Image (tube, coloured by chain):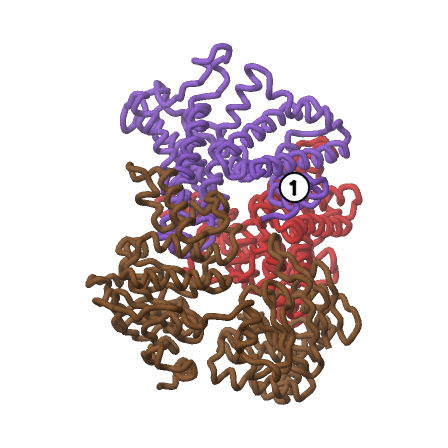
Amino acid sequence: MRQILTFSLLFSTIRLSTPLVLAAIGGLYSERSGVINIALEGLLLAGAFTAASVTYYAHNPWVGLGSAIVAGAAVAAIIAVACIRFKADQVVTGTGMNILFIGLPAVLSGALFLSSGSTPQIPKENLLPDLSRLLPFLPSWRILTDVSIISVLALIAVLLTRYILYRTPFGLRLRAVGENPEAADAAGVKVTRIRYLGVILSGALAGIGGAYLSIGQSSLFTRNMAAGRGFIALAALIFGKWRPVQTMLACLLFGLADALTIQMQGVAKLPSGEDIPVQFIQMIPYVVTIIVLAGFIGQSRAPKAIGIPYEKER
Amino acid sequence: MIELRNITKRFGAVLANDRVSIKVTPGTIHAIVGENGAGKSTAMRIAYGFYTADSGEILINGEVREIRTPHDAIALGIGMVHQHFMLVEPMTVAENIVLGAEPGTAVSLDLKKAAEEIRKVSDEFKLAVDPNATIETLSVGQQQRVELLKALYRHAQLLILDEPTAVLTPQEVEEFFAILRRMREQGKTIVIITHKLSEVLAISDDVTVMRDGKVVGEVKTSETNAAELARLMVGREVLLRVEKPDANPGAAVLKVKDLSIVGRDGSKRVDGVTFEISTSEIVGIAGVEGNGQTELIEALAGLIPGSHVSGAISFEGRDITQTDARRRKELGIAHVPEDRHRRGLLLDFSLAENTILGVHYRKPAVSRDGILLDQKGIQRRTEQVIRDFDVRPPNPMLPARALSGGNQQKLIIGREFELPPKLLLVSQPTRGVDIGAIEFIHRKIVALRDAGCAVLLVSAELEEVTALSDRLLVIHNGQIVGEVDPKATTNEEIGLMMTGGHK
Amino acid sequence: MKLLREILFPLIAVIAAFIVGGIVVWIIGDSPIQTYKLLIGSAFSWPDGIGYTLFNATPLIFTGLAVAVAFRCGLLNIGAEGQLYVAAFAAAWVGMKFGAPDPGNTFVGQWAHLPAIVLLPMCCIAAVAAGAIWGGIPGVLKARFGSHEVINTIMLNFIAVALLSYFTQYRYKIPGDPIMQTAPTSPSANLIHLGRFIPGLPERIPLNFAFLLAILACVLVYVFLWKTKWGYEMRATGANPSAAEYGGVSIRKQIILAMAISGGLAGMVGINEVLGYRHRYYDGFSANYGFVGIAVALLGRNHPVGVFLAAILFAILLRGGIFVDAFTMHVSKDIVDMLQGIVIVFVAAEAMFRGPLKQFGLLKKAKV
């Protein structure tokens, strides 16, 4: 067991949690405004594909990251128009988007790179850097060198979100709109505008998360590379009771489970000498989520108006 | 101050406002009265930008202004307190008050400054409330103060109040009126929407009367009286008393002993209630809304989980405290719920499918095998209800949504009368129902009583309970605080009991 | 009028999706018309086109019905994917354990040696029961704890995948087999291909008895929902739970029942897949049938007839995708996923077509 609980477990937890945190914090903006965002998975994929393709052509990860943000925001804007303007069912729309972004990147990469579903390899120097490359004067402790700049960005996003949510007028309005849009409207708040902003912000953040997947922790986009992380982020958001810091902690927990899955492969043994099948460790976050939802570990109360389109004249 | 000119508003097939013109003089209290559905709230919601008028214009201080959203209205100095409070429950008083008009900059919310300003306003108008309290923890009266503060904080010069007294006791109403007078003295203009004539006479300077979406009268309060206003409201002389022979009660049908009900949040909603109802009598329950009536009726109908109910309910001698809703219906307990859209109807289902709700599993809704629905049987029953209760339009295949409020209510009552009931639990039978249907429904209830049925009636309209009931129980804070003979008691006395003061 | 609207909106959504898809195809440099010809045209040849289209439609009918039944009760079952996996495994497991022995396959016939006439129904029941249980779990969780079925079904999808991957890898794989699949089921668990009865349809086409089951399921779901008191209760719960409760219906029971029926229907995919086609459990066999089922149900307006038609449409695309892959320069079969996604979004946001339709006078202005 000793060989598992090492620094490398810590780093791989941070690595694996980073996209979860970004997607979940993104989801927080959307859901706090009252729009369920089940499309985080699709948004991650949109960001990942855009980042990889653009970086491949532009030879610059920052351009790639920027376009991933734009792509995420743009896709989220489509969701917002469908759900807010046309009052489409939010879960159904999100599910449609998730399926769309299994197909679309594959179609595009097939056309652009003549490969089925993945983009070409990007050389290491064109990937998003970790801290040591960005700030070469830092002492070479692993905690500073092995962490991606995006992980730091994710932490900043969490803290900033906490401030925005509770200490700015926008945060107040966001919370009010998700809780009781009619009351917010009566108070002069422009409900639809806040909701659009919330959903689009969620796309932008999930876009960063996606970029991290393709040009941060790996070096290309592969078909369906989000592999359920969007859903895990959603679960973490619920587990974290729609609060920024708790949500991040939930993401770290799920990241840890993921890290353990990788590290324990072939290492952990049952008393009988058999391997512990990784599948059982893989299941942990999902089982935990179900248990949390059932209220065994404290109640998690959703924003009251979540999932309900705001209809003014009924 | 504000003037509506020829405002017209249509909701689907319903003409809610038909060329409505109202002129409010600055510095006055202006009442808008009318029955439910007369279009009062619609007109004022248009003035506040909640709805957009199909045609017509709004003038503020003599100038035509465009009010598309509440945001526009607020900017023009208009504030509105809605019938259902517009408060965000998990947030604090201060957060609710400043929402949309936050002090400080875009990147920093200055709640300290907000609290200060709130205190200033609340001192000025004697509206004390703790800025740091969460809305959920406040009483209804305190929440109303927050609503007033919200408008005053935004420097509203015109305050629109939609049925502000519906949730208040007569004593609280007095206090509330004092606040309004104080505001008028400070130069504010107030529009108050109500359907209670006594309040109109007590507080207002001018009155606009609305009926069927139209303005039908404009008078100075000092130059009118209740009878005239009532006539304007309903369009003819009103029968305040329901014609009914004396009751002839027989044996007790329902016995409720020491019944207590706990709400979902764990608070006690009904507290140790004991009473009986006999055959051939109507027992009314009077009380300010939200004092446990809803829970009491739902518990008697079997709609509150047994674990939340203690005490004993017996029906025709057998204990039914833990019996489920379906079984109670089989025993002959019919229930006309207070909210017909939430409880009473499947709005997207046809009238036929609505007529079998609750009896859908037995004859005549199902055929002999007990599984397949019997379309012919359903059709026959529906046609009978439609005929007996004059439901219009008489088309069984129409969705319930397509009916007017009065016809929806007649459909529900018809369905429940078909049971046939030995005990009828009926809550707000005429809420949002036109005057013709009200009389029809009242006559039907009395006829049911005369046929031997026991009736338990809850209504927010004191006139309705006193007119229909043979005996009247007064409920306050989940407790029955007294029983009176409605014929021998004045509304003022009952009102006093409703506040908890004993006779 | 009402019927027209029920058909009009899904039709417009499909056309709109094809237009958007066509634009994508055009941008990446292929001819949209050529692509759509390949995508749709290939479905109508006899016997291969029609045979394979109906075979592909079978799982989609089941999952479409599954989603539709849950939807009618006001529930969104995103877990059909997990339910059908669990069910397929259960069918394969029974087909192994209880089947007539197969020389050289030690996994078969360990517990009993049942003939096809007993074994096949048993396998079918196992599939339906497993799906019903896997679907019933989120139902119970919602009824008992009020936790949302959408998240729980998503989580159970992942759990199912992990669990079955374990069983396949560690318990039921033939040692040394590089593919993640169980050992074959007993030959007595093989469902008859319809080619045996239909002249001109070769037996190699896997269209099998499960397709007839799918049609039967459509009829039964229709009768259940609209002609029985149980269906009335379920639809009432979906339309207005408070009113249903008032009408003496137990909401909790309906939620559990609807999810179990939904899961059972999704589970019937296992019959087609395992008993009718692969004759073993193959890890990851589903081409997103569970999720496409949502599109099928939505497009079919949660009505069995609509579900049937929508399933045929998506099945056509599924097969056409292969031809698109082979015969176009740039477009891959992934265009099918893309189109499905767009269709779902357009169906969900049908309100966007209302304005233009009104302008062209196709829709009455005042909506009752």
| Residue C141 visible in the snapshot | no
Q: Is residue C127 visible?
A: yes
B284 is higher (above) or lower (below) than C283: below
Residue drawn at x 44%, y 63% is B439
B24 w.r.t. C325: above or below: below
Q: Which residue is tagged 1?
A: C363
**Color used for chain C?**
purple
Q: Quadrant of the C terminus of chain A?
A: bottom right
Instruction: Determine the residue positioned at 56% across, 80% down.
Output: B225
x then y, percent, for residue B443: 39, 62
**In the structure shown, which secondary structural element does the residue marked by tag 1 occupy?**
loop
The residue at the point 34 percent across, 18 percent down is C103
C299 relative position to B20: left or right: left
What is the chain identity of the residue bearing mark 1? C
Residue C39 in the image: x percent, y percent? 65, 25
The colour of chain A is red
Q: Nearer the viewer, residue C222 or A121?
A: C222
Q: Colour of chain B?
A: brown
